[in-house]
Image (spheres, coloured by chain):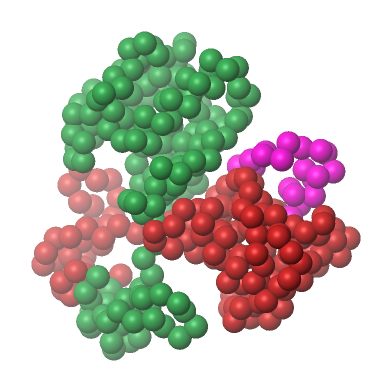
Chain colours: A green, B red
Amino acid sequence: MNFCSACGASVAYKVPTEDNRLRAVCTSCEVVHYINPKIVLGSLPTWQGKVLLCRRAIDPRHGYWTLPAGFMELDESTQEGAARETLEESGAQVRMGSLFAVMDIPVVQQVHIFYRAEMLSPDLDPGPESLEARLFDEAEIPWDDLAFRSVTLALELFFQDRAAGAPSDRVHSVRL
Amino acid sequence: MNFCSACGASVAYKVPTEDNRLRAVCTSCEVVHYINPKIVLGSLPTWQGKVLLCRRAIDPRHGYWTLPAGFMELDESTQEGAARETLEESGAQVRMGSLFAVMDIPVVQQVHIFYRAEMLSPDLDPGPESLEARLFDEAEIPWDDLAFRSVTLALELFFQDRAAGAPSDRVHSVRL
């Protein structure tokens, strides 16, 4: 950040009064600009035991497989955002389920939140951010071609839970 | 947002290509400025069955009681941030526990995440953001003088769980 988004003057990095870390502070209107981590929302959509993955048509990780996920927008809940991303990226109609995982990834300044999702039909209609979308049995998961560590971990936890007969509302809290 | 924080030119609100909502886009360098919800991290610190609350020395809700909580910073996990806020606001030394609740509050563009925390001693040393900090039995909780709805709900859920003998790692997922 170089300029104040409120008044357009340049910013300087300094520790505001009663604060304890460097912030971008406007040299003219003195507004403090806070920069905070972002939330990524995703879902684990399933249909008859298979898991829905999308192959990315955008960078980063173009061509790699991911669970439907994306940045949380204003004016939505985490569950609504996960449903929105699922529809946008795969065209799947889903009934959103319980919270599945909260994943801290401080190295990229993100928190990833995943929900379970029950597909209402196997019909898919991937949007412009996906090259394709399809359902995978556990044995078919393209482990070497997954886009993000959080996706790999979500799938590992999902199949571990299924094998162990874990409660359907179990929530994982992990740091990557 | 009126000006581009990268180059200082004015921004215009338009829907970028391949996007579906209005964004602040720089009229000069064309950077798209995304605005996303923020994460508030809090803890439920306990000592011998009592809960730690802090009375706010800052706006909003100056003078009202709250669980230790504040905005997530860069380069920390959600649990680390909850511990940081607990120390800053109360001076309590705690062992952070399991994830307690994820609360969606879209009306204020926030997601509040609470962790359980076990106090290592009853010693308190409230920082400049708190007028005072003290431990409360359930019967003493100042329900009418709590600062935020998420704090009220967290305390209600906590005491409900305790009365019901709920598992100590139960996670609440709610929308306010």
- Residue drawn at the location 73% of the way across and 48% of the way down: B157
x and y, in percent, of residue B12 in the image: 21, 65
Residue B104 lies, with reference to residue A117, above or below; the image says below
Please give the name of the residue rendered at 62% of the width and 53% of the height, measured from the top-left corner.
B96
**Can you give x and y, in whole percent of width and height, for residue B53 in the image?**
72, 67
The quarter of the picture where the N terminus of chain B appears is bottom left
Please state the horizontal and vertical placement of residue A164, each as a whole percent of the image: 58, 17
- Vertical position of residue A2 compared to residue A175: above or below: below
Q: Quadrant of residue A27?
A: bottom left
Q: Is residue B68 left or right of residue B123?
A: left
A155 or A136: nearer the viewer: A155
Asked if residue A74 lies in the magenta stretch, the reply is no
Q: Position of residue B39 (x, y in %)?
A: 48, 57
Image-based side of A10 in relation to A93, left or right: left
Asked whether, in this view, residue A42 is left or right of residue B83, the answer is left
As for residue B175 lying within the magenta part, the answer is: yes
Residue at x 50%, y 53% (from the top left corner): B78
Q: Which residues make up the magenta segment? A: B155-176
Q: How many marks?
A: 0
Which sits in the foreground, B21 or A4?
A4
Whether residue B152 is visible, yes or no, is no
For the question of whether residue B25 can be seen, the reply is: yes
Please say if A171 is above or below B84: above
Kindly identify the residue that appears in the image at 81 percent across and 64 percent down. B136
